Image (cartoon, grey):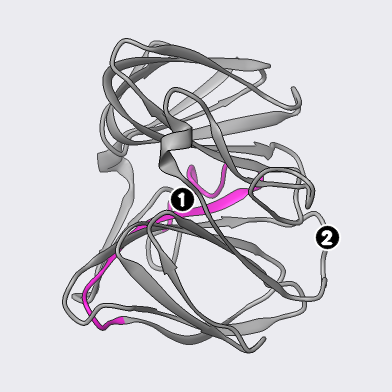
């Protein structure tokens, strides 16, 4: 088993005034050759955007992009003709494929939005761009993994062009649970959103993360009740 611990204070940080961003992996002006990606997981950004502000129209291609608002609402427009608002309790997926343009703006003029944006390398290049958006009920994540993203159109949640799974879980204090990986060729990156957890002898406080590979399961022990984001990806792709 290989374990990589990423303390919250080792993430990259950018303060643009309207945007305060924490980067788990190298992104934009923050570059760390030891933190380029975790397997097929390329980006995990933790963004806070002030009211009425956001990212203007910009391009993407050949990347699976997943947006998960933690609080607030994000207004999205793209070159495929979608104009949508993504709220906390929803997940948005874009397969950039052959190429798209999109913009993302805080839907509120006054309240901040906090969101995770995740980029995963796809297993297919130059696909037709696609958009999807789903709701989930966080109550279904109480002491169990609620799947938000998978490789299968027929599975729970939405899907992407990669053998990757994204789940969320709310653990009560003193609970213990095992996460079983779909393949020993995969790894799992676990972000502790809030609370305090123990994973492979590492104590994770708020926004600490751990990447685990070369194993078929990971044991999570809850010290203080909290929420975790779990991202399973191929380590070679």
Q: Residue 49: give x, y in percent of width and height.
A: 27, 70
Q: Residue 35: give x, y in percent of width and height.
A: 48, 45
Using a 10 Å C-alpha cutoff, classify the residue at mark 2 as few (fewer than 14 neighbours), some (14 to 19) or many (20 or more). few
Local secondary structure at mark 2: loop
Using a 10 Å C-alpha cutoff, classify the residue at mark 1 as few (fewer than 14 neighbours), some (14 to 19) or many (20 or more). many
Q: In the drawing, does residue 211 fall left or right of residue 180?
A: left
Quadrant of residue 92 within the rendered picture:
bottom right
Quadrant of residue 85 within the rendered picture:
bottom left
- Labels 2 & 1 near each other (Cβ < 8 A): no
Quadrant of residue 86 within the rendered picture:
bottom left
Local secondary structure at mark 1: loop
Establish if 2 lies above or below 233: above
How much space separates mark 2 and mark 1, taking CA atoms?
22 Å
Establish if 188 lies above or below 215: below
| Residue 177 in magenta stretch | no
**Magenta residues?**
31-53
What residue did someone put label 1 on? 25
Q: Residue 27: give x, y in percent of width and height.
A: 45, 61
What residue did someone put label 2 on? 124
Establish if 201 lies above or below 136: above
Q: Residue 45: give x, y in percent of width and height.
A: 41, 56
| Residue 41 in magenta stretch | yes
Q: Residue at x 59, y 84 (%)?
A: 82
Q: In the drawing, does residue 236 fall left or right of residue 176?
A: right
Name the one closer to the observer, 40 or 81. 81
Q: Name the N-terminal-most of marks 2 and 1.
A: 1
Q: Residue at x 75, y 72 (%)?
A: 97
Magenta stretch secondary structure, dominant: loop
Q: In the drawing, does residue 142 fall left or right of residue 197?
A: right
């Amino acid at each position: 088993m290989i374990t990589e611990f990423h303390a919250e204070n080792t993430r990259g940080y950018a303060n643009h005034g309207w945007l305060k961003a924490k980067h788990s992996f190298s992104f934009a002006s923050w570059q760390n050759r030891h933190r380029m990606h975790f397997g097929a997981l390329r980006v995990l950004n933790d963004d806070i955007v002030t009211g009425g502000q956001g990212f203007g129209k910009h391009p993407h291609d050949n990347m699976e992009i997943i947006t998960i608002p933690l609080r607030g609402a994000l207004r999205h427009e793209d070159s495929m003709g979608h104009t949508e608002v993504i709220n906390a309790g929803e997940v948005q997926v874009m397969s950039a494929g052959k190429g798209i343009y999109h913009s993302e703006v805080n839907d509120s003029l006054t309240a901040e939005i906090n969101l995770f944006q995740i980029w995963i390398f796809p297993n297919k290049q130059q696909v037709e761009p696609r958009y999807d958006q789903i709701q989930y009920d966080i109550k279904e994540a109480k002491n169990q993994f609620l799947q938000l993203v998978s490789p299968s159109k027929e599975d729970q949640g939405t899907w992407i062009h990669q053998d990757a799974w994204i789940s969320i879980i709310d653990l009560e204090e003193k609970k213990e649970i095992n996460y079983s990986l779909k393949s020993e060729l995969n790894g799992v990156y676990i972000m502790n959103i809030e609370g305090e957890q123990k994973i492979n002898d590492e104590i994770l406080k708020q926004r600490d993360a751990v990447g685990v590979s070369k194993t078929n399961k990971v044991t999570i022990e809850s010290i203080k009740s909290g929420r975790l984001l779990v991202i399973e990806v191929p380590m070679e792709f």
